[in-house]
Image (cartoon, rainbow, N blue to C red):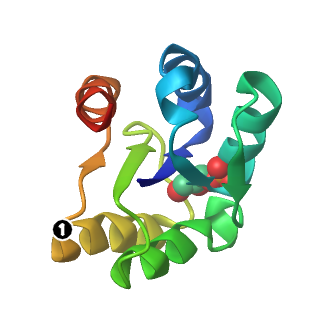
Amino acid sequence: MRIALIAHDRMKDRMVALAREFAPMLRQHQLMGTGTTGGRLVDEVGLDVERLLSGPLGGDLQIGARLSVGEVDAVVFLRDPMTPQPHEPDINALVRACDVHDVPCATNISSARLLLRALG
Ligand SMILES: O=C(CO)COP(=O)(O)O
């Protein structure tokens, strides 16, 4: 499976903890992430993650574009619900693309755990 991992700044520690928890499972899959999130997962968890652009520079759009042509199977997107983001339209575009193409998209830790368990 091709899994995209994305987290806003205040959610990145939680993404790292989640990735540690699921590291053995995640290693079985092809991973991609936005720039900073991907970097942390590489450096702190030792995962092999293809790093795309940082979110505010177009990383969400890159993932959305891949997803729209069938190149992403699942998304974990830990959005920060409390902080406005300069690239809000990109964020909405990615979540919308998940809905348009019926790609599972977990936007909080509980749903991410369920999704990653299901992908086993
Ligand atoms: O902004 C993001 C998603 O909208 C995440 O981007 P970074 O992983 O580069 O911080």
Of 45 and 15, nearer the camera is: 45
Look at 52% across and 38% down and name the residue there. 28
107 is higher (above) or lower (below) than 118: below
Instruction: Point out residue 114 in the picture as x, y percentages from the top left corner.
Output: 23, 27
Instruction: Point out residue 9 in the picture as x, y percentages from the top left corner.
Output: 62, 38
Look at 24% across and 53% down and name the residue there. 104
The kind of secondary structure element at disc 1 is helix
Residue at the far right in the pictured view: 43
Number of disc labels = 1
Answer left or right for 28 relative to 42: left
Instruction: Point out residue 43 in the picture as x, y percentages from the top left corner.
Output: 82, 31
Look at 57% across and 50% down and name the residue there. 31
- Residue type at mark 1: give it: Asp
Q: Is mark 1 within 8 Å of ligand 1?
A: no
Look at 35% across and 60% down and name the residue there. 73
Q: Which residue is mark 1?
A: 99
Instruction: Point out residue 8 in the picture as x, y percentages from the top left corner.
Output: 55, 43
Q: Quadrant of the C terminus?
A: top left
Answer left or right for 118 relative to 25: left
Label 1 CA crowd tier, 10 Å (few <14, some 14–19, many 20+): few
35 is higher (above) or lower (below) than 62: above
